[in-house]
Image: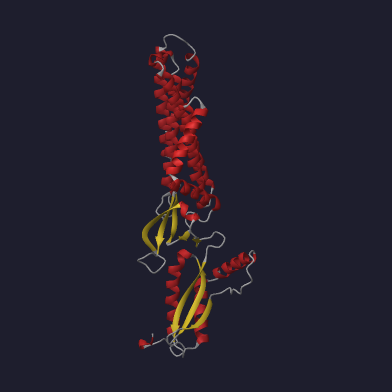
């Protein structure tokens, strides 16, 4: 469809020339009106074909499917669709604005000025939307951090809405003082009736600026625990994990919505801190007093070291570097999985394996470690004995 691009340019040049020569003239402009509609029709067709050409561009082949089942190519196509839709609407508004300047439309009387204001205001508002959508596309292409990208897009949408409101008010009120006074009274009334939503909106600003958590983080607020999937202007949505029906760290399938104002009144536990997105985890094993504790400790540590690899040592180095930046006294932290013993109140010894892990991998790694460790311990029944009968 590239052959339509010259057609678009010619149509646009013709309508601009026609506007230049015809708007200042007076008298009967019916022939010019007919030409206006003709070239406006041609311009609309040209923009439509150009839009179709962009939408029909050959897409690159998929290399993999997103685990979250979000097709980036589909989202990109959707953003381009809205961008070109806004452009076409803006052209229609500005064309209507210039057409209404012709003397033939004087039959509308004082409604002519109102229609001109509506068309001009609509054009400016749509241009704001075009700029916002274009900035959104640039941010998505150039920003690699999903959380920063999400917050920037939210801010752009908020600013675009505020600008459109200002444009609307400026066209509705000739006197800005009267408009400001009217808005002040309305704001005062709404301030008393919408205290909770306003505090939630301020909470959203706090979340964006102070960043106690981002989209994708695993957090706990009061009794709410889950992965942050959306931060709206008034509330935050979590994809719950564990919960009332599970004892592990798997998603429960439920969504949790809580007001953003809750961050001012409750402690926020973030399991996905960007500087150190790991947590300490432990697995207890119960063995008999007759077991070879040294062999048990070495076997468990070797299996964990084999599974976790050198990654844990790197995590410990980061952890120590962070501790050095705080006034906390130096703590002895081993750069390998740590095994400790504890006497249980019953008749066995509790062996505790402690290691670092990413929160979202805790359940899978725990299961793998338990299976591999038990297999290794069972290979030496003379050195490793487990509690039997009712003693356990």
- Pick the residue in front: 199 or 316: 199
- State the image coordinates of residue 122 (x, y, percent, origin top left): 44, 29
Total labels drawn:
0
Tell me which corner region of the image, top left, top right, bottom left or bottom right, holds residue 324.
bottom right
Which quadrant does the N terminus fall into? top left
- Pick the residue in front: 372 or 344: 344
Residue visible at 40% across and 31% down in the picture: 48
**Camera sees residue 58:** no
**Camera sees residue 326:** yes
Which quadrant does the C terminus fall into? bottom left
User: Does residue 245 appear to the left or right of 309 in the view shown?
Assistant: left
Name the colouring of the figure. Answer: secondary structure
- State the image coordinates of residue 123 (x, y, percent, origin top left): 46, 29
Residue visible at 51% across and 25% down in the picture: 175
Residue visible at 47% across and 35% down in the picture: 185
Query: Does 74 appear above or below 298?
Result: above
- Pick the residue in front: 80 or 268: 268
């Amino acid at each position: 469809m590239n052959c339509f691009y010259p057609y678009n340019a010619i149509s646009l040049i013709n309508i601009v020339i026609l506007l230049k020569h015809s708007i200042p003239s007076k008298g009967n402009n019916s022939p010019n009106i007919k030409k206006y509609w003709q070239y406006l029709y041609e311009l609309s067709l040209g923009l439509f074909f150009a839009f179709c050409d962009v939408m029909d561009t050959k897409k690159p082949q998929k290399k993999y499917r997103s685990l979250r089942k979000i097709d980036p190519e589909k989202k990109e196509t959707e953003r381009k669709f809205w961008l070109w839709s806004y452009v076409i609407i803006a052209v229609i508004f500005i064309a209507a604005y210039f057409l209404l300047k012709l003397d033939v439309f004087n039959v509308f009387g004082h409604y002519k000025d109102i229609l001109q204001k509506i068309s001009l205001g609509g054009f400016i508002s749509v241009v704001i939307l075009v700029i916002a959508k274009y900035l959104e596309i640039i941010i998505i292409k150039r920003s690699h951090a999903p959380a920063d990208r999400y917050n920037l897009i939210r801010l752009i949408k908020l600013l675009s809405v505020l600008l459109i409101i200002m444009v609307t008010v400026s066209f509705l009120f000739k006197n800005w003082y009267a408009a400001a006074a009217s808005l002040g009274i309305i704001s005062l009334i709404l301030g008393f009736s919408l205290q909770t939503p306003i505090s939630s909106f301020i909470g959203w600003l706090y979340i964006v600026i102070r960043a106690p958590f981002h989209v994708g983080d695993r957090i706990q607020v009061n009794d709410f625990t889950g992965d942050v999937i959306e931060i709206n202007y008034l509330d935050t949505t979590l994809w719950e994990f564990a919960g009332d029906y599970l004892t592990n760290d798997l998603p429960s399938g439920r969504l949790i919505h809580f007001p953003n104002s809750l961050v001012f009144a409750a402690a926020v536990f973030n399991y996905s801190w960007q500087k150190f997105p790991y947590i300490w985890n432990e697995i207890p094993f119960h063995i008999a007093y007759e077991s070879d504790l040294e062999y048990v400790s070495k076997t468990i540590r070797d299996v964990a070291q084999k599974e976790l690899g050198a990654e844990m040592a790197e995590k410990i180095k980061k952890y120590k570097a962070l501790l050095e930046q705080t006034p906390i006294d130096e703590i002895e932290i081993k750069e390998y999985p740590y095994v400790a013993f504890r006497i249980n109140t019953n008749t066995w010894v509790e062996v505790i394996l402690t290691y670092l892990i990413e929160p979202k991998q805790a359940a899978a790694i725990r299961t793998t470690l338990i299976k591999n460790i038990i297999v290794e311990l069972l290979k030496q029944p003379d050195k490793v004995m487990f509690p039997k009968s009712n003693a356990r």
